[in-house]
Amino acid sequence: MTDLTPNIPEVVAEIRELFERYEKALVDKNVEVLDATFWDSPHTIRWSTNEHGYGFDEIHAQRVRRPPGPGTKEARRRLEIRTLGRDIATVNLEYKVRGQNKIGRQTQTWVRFPEGWKVINAHVSVIEPDA
């Protein structure tokens, strides 16, 4: 059976570093880093509030079209990284949406492949804050 020990500190640190690299690449519109973050597969999915990418090629096309800049994230509210063993991780970010009274939620599923960690599934949504 595969070891599924939760939150091995060095694995959590590795994912945190990759996630921060990805977030910086979003602001800088570094398509090379953005592409390197995602699994180059027709099975990869990335949903967001305005875009739905089924497969790496659609996700890449969205990256090329997106303008550089700070995007929708004004301030982080909570970042949770969960790992199982050394090869599976999830990242969940809750943030304040820039210029709106709304909360954004971002989830990524990461898997370690022979070529390194890759996001296989990502989702971004926006909600009204609790009353």
Image (cartoon, rainbow, N blue to C red):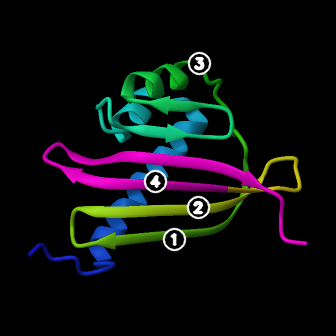
The residue shown at (57%, 33%) is: 28
The residue shown at (61%, 40%) is: 48
Which numbered disc flags the more N-terminal residue, 2 or 4? 2
Return the residue at label 2. Answer: 93
Query: What kind of residue is marked 2?
Result: Leu
Distance of label 1 from label 3 (alpha carbons): 29 Å
Distance of label 1 from label 2 (alpha carbons): 6 Å
Query: What kind of residue is marked 1?
Result: Glu
Which numbered disc flags the more N-terminal residue, 1 or 4? 1
Q: Is residue 49 left or right of residue 118?
A: right
Return the residue at label 4. Answer: 108
Return the residue at label 1. Answer: 80
Q: Secondary structure at mark 2?
A: strand
Please name the predominant secondary structure of the magenta segment in the image.
Answer: strand
Residue 65 is marked as 3
Front label number (4 vs 3): 4
Distance of label 2 from label 4 (alpha carbons): 9 Å
Which corner quadrant holds the C terminus? bottom right
Instruction: Look at the image and say whether residue 31 sits in the magenta stretch.
Output: no
Distance of label 3 from label 2 (alpha carbons): 24 Å
Magenta segment: 105-131
Q: Residues within 10 Å of mark 4 (few under 14, many from 20)?
A: many
Q: Secondary structure at mark 1?
A: strand
Residue 89 is marked as none
Q: Residues within 10 Å of mark 3 (few under 14, many from 20)?
A: few
Q: Residues within 10 Å of mark 2 (few under 14, many from 20)?
A: some
Which numbered disc flags the more N-terminal residue, 1 or 3? 3
The residue shown at (40%, 55%) is: 109
